Amino acid sequence: MSKENNSENKIKYCVHCGAKVGENETYCPNCGKLVVKLSDAKSEITPPKLKTAKITRTCPGCGSIITSPILEQCPICNTILEKVPKDMRSEPSETPQKGSGVIFSDKKLVPEKALTLKKDSWNLKEGLNVFVNALVWYVMIRFLIIILLSLQSQAINVDITTILLSQIPDLIFAVYPIWYIYAKKHKFSKLGFNFKRSKVIYAFILGIIGAIILVFTDVLSNYIIEFMYSIGINFANVDTYITQEHAVIQDANLTWLILLIALLVIGSISSEIIYRGVLHNTLREYFQNKIIGRIYVILIVAVIYSAIYLLFSLPIGLYFFVTNFIVFIILGIIYEINGNILNTIIVNAIYNITLVLIIYFNVSLF
């Protein structure tokens, strides 16, 4: 009889959810968290109230077995899990849990905070996953357009159709993250959108100022190209290409001009959602929003954008690498002023519209 009582006293209960845990078990079979051992007591141990036995769910995405009743999404593949009925969940402990728990994943303990998806901010794995998936679609569409244009002729001519088609990949760039936010029922503030009246007015003011700065930065690119010419870097005949592109825009009728401006504006929105709403916000969350972290984020995003642009514009893109890097640093600084993506969307849109109008009306800034 005494042995049975002794055995009963050694039974443990999870302090997180109240589930019964065997003597030799380190992790709770119900919620998957580390178990806190209870010291032996002379008196009989009274277990916390528990409404349910062991709950297991199978992830429809990757097949993982989820034993935690509190997770809404799979920590491995982010697939939404079947909801656990309220009457099957364990009652909360009288003593609130301090700090976040841990989850046993990939043969190691991972902080629950790192895997739990938030509706208003990105964790590193989630944000990079969304960015890479969007980039894959962008690359596929970009290569498809290049192949289609190459089939028509051996040399891709610079005409209004080519210019318009080149904007299509930018248009679809943000489709995946927008769908992801909608499908997961997350908040669009996760992408940095803030539509408060005061914020919108402030964004327009910053947009005008920022666009002026970027226009003069574009003028700087002309001096950079001239300098590269002066030191003998002239392997892509970039001056001829720019002249042809300007001539096509100047000769375009009003309908084509309006269509080009519309595509550039939509492309600006799409680009900012990807680079600012997803990548920038993800890295800023990772660096914990510290000042030195913000500097790293601005530089990293600028390098990634410049490298992607260079990849699809070689060899001409070499002439614009420095300019693109400077432009994205400026956009990153403007975004960091108040964290509203409307700032950089308006800056980018006004900047692109201004450049097209300057080319169309053949305005010389200097």
Image (cartoon, rainbow, N blue to C red):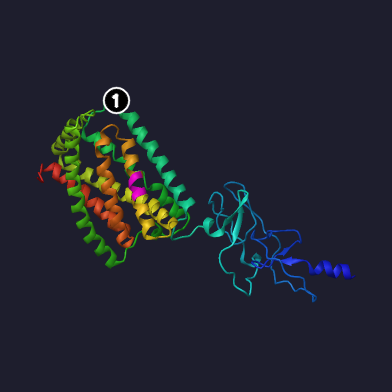
Q: Amino acid at mark 1?
A: Gln
Is 113 above or below relative to 132? below
Q: Identify the residue shown where x is 38% and y is 40%.
A: 138
Figure label count: 1
Horizontal side of 134 relative to 39 (left or right) equals: left
Is 361 above or below relative to 148? below
| Quarter of the image where the C terminus is located | top left
| Magenta range | 299-303
Farthest residue, direction top: 154
Front one among 219 and 18: 219
| Horizontal and vertical percent position of residue 186 | 45, 58
Is 258 above or below relative to 112? above
* Residue highlighted by disc 1: 152
Front one among 19 and 185: 19
Farthest residue, direction front: 231
Question: Is-magenta flag for residue 181?
Answer: no
| Horizontal and vertical percent position of residue 247 | 14, 35
Res. 320 image quadrant: top left
Give the overall secondary structure of the magenta segment.
helix
SS at mark 1? Answer: helix
Task: Tell me if mark 1 has few (under 14), some (14-19) or many (20+) residues whose alpha carbon lies within 10 angstroms of its own.
Answer: few
Q: Identify the residue shown where x is 74% and y is 70%.
A: 39
Is 124 above or below relative to 98? above
